[in-house]
Structure formats: C-alpha cells, structure tokens
Image (cartoon, grey):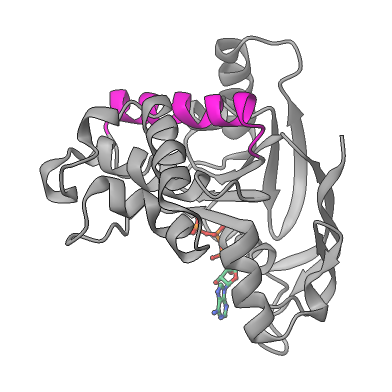
Amino acid sequence: MHTVLQVKDVTKIYKKGQKPSLHKVSFQVCEGEFIGIMGASGSGKTTLLNVLSTIDKPTGGDVYLNNINLKSLTDTQAADFRRDHLGFIFQEYFLLDSLTIRENISVPLTLKKLPPDQIETMVTDLAKRFGIASQLEKYPNELSGGQRQRVSAARAIVKHPGLLFADEPTGALDSSSATELLEALKEANSVLNTTILMVTHDPYAASFASRIFLFKDGCIFRELHREKADRRRFYEQIVDEVAELDMDR
Ligand SMILES: Nc1ncnc2c1ncn2[C@@H]1O[C@H](COP(=O)(O)OP(=O)(O)OP(=O)(O)O)[C@@H](O)[C@H]1O
C-alpha cells in the first residue's frame, strides 16, 4: 500500500521564545488508513492539522502529501492542492443554505467541470451510502444536525480526496447521530479506500480508527493500533490510555 502522507521532523513555533507547539513530529500514513489524533487541549492537534492541510507552514521539517513536498507550493498552488486533493469535515457543517442537498454535495464536482450525468450518479451513490438519499431535494435547514453532518461528509468524500481531514466531526452531534456519521466514515474508508485523519477528544469516535496518535506537549506520546481487537475492546483500551495520560479536557 503506498504512503499518502509522510511527516518528517515537523516543528511549529508560533512566536520566538515560545515552546514549540509541535516538536519534531514524524509519522507516515498509508492509503486506506483511518487515523485518530487525540490529546489534551493545547497539545498541538489543530496546529498539526493546519500544517498538514497546507493552511499553515511548519517552522521546520517536511510534509509530503502524495509525494509532493508542501514546502514547494506557493500560496496559490497550495489552495489548488487543497481543492483538488484534500477533503475537510469540521464540527460546523458549512453547507450552503440556498442550495439543495444534491447541489451542496455536487459543488466539488461542478467545480471540476465533470459532466452532469456523471455528477448525478456519483452524488446519488454516495448519498445512499450516507443514508441521505431521500433528502437530496431538500434544503439544509430541513435536515437534522446529524443528517447535515453526513451531507458535509458526503461533500468532502465525493471528489475522492487523497486525504480526508475530520476535525471533531462528532463534536456537535448526539450519540446516535455520531454513530451514524462514524459508521458512514468507516464505510467510506473500507469500501472507497478513503484515507482519513480525524482529530477527536472522544474515545468512542476514536475507536472507529485503525491507528491512533496520542499527542502530548507537541509530540506523539503514544501510538495505539487496533489490529484485530474489536471496536469495543479498542474503545476500552483508548479510555484506559486517556485516563492514564490525564488527557480529558
Ligand atoms: N496562532 C497561535 N499563536 C500562538 N500560539 C498558538 C497559536 N495557535 C496555537 N498556539 C499554541 O500552540 C499550542 C497548541 O495549540 P493547538 O491549538 O494546536 O492545540 P489543540 O491540541 O488543538 O487544542 P484544542 O484541543 O483545545 O483545540 C498551544 O499552546 C497554543 O496556545
């Protein structure tokens, strides 16, 4: 399986004299992995996501995404790279209220100028996977929070991003909506081979990942592998680690 993301000795110092927010962080992610990023508030998770997604630049070290060194990109190239290769899901849904759900999910494909019938097929297929096929002609304000988040996930995945970043995607959802979203992400991961990097404080959400990096003070403090453990056992392991590291917010 090929390496999608390579992070080498990445350091981020916001202000001279300040403690590094990331300190020589190194890891690799292979295509089709589902990575969870956990850590206490202030441990560097958002900083890492910003640096990996070309939104911010590291002070030192290198990030290779699909073998492209992000350092080599100009700001305009970085914006194009984000549009063409990366997908994002945030705690907020960021849907366009004046567009239908079908139109919202179609936006990335319309921007790519794909033929309408191809867009139609891709959007309908994905909407079925995400359990929102019957909502396609509605508007965002007619949907529940959980449904809106699945729409925003479908919009991020429909363009087949090389890497999908999810930043606290279940943060605003009740537990059953969170489960529906996480199961949909897991399905996209296993069926469509979408590579996912998800920041979360929630051990339950993290238990859907196959590998987890626990951050502390800007460094990877521990790495957990799900391997053959079922999700429940993995969840228990994560809860134990979080308690041990006192990582609760
Ligand atoms: N723009 C900035 N300027 C200066 N320091 C910053 C900036 N952004 C973050 N930091 C500092 O970097 C460190 C890591 O912050 P970061 O936001 O990455 O943590 P986090 O793990 O995402 O926290 P949370 O879970 O609360 O979102 C913190 O000490 C924070 O104060």
Position of 215 relative to 146 (above/below): below
**In which quadrant is the N terminus drawn?**
top right
Can the viewer see residue 48 in this picture? yes
Quadrant for residue 66, please give it: bottom right
Q: Residue furthest left?
A: 142
Q: Nearer the viewer, residue 216 or 71?
A: 71
Q: Residue at x 61, y 31 (%)?
A: 192
Ligand 1 falls in which quarter? bottom right
Q: Is residue 10 left or right of residue 197?
A: right
Q: Residue at x 72, y 87 (%)?
A: 17
Q: Which residues are magenta?
A: 174-194
Q: Is residue 166 left or right of residue 48?
A: left
Position of 91 relative to 122 (above/below): below
Can the viewer see residue 56 in this picture? no
Picture coordinates of residue 224, whole percent (x, y): 74, 30
Q: Find out whether residue 156 is within the magenta segment.
A: no
Main SS class of the magenta portion in the image:
helix
Picture coordinates of residue 166, whole percent (x, y): 52, 48
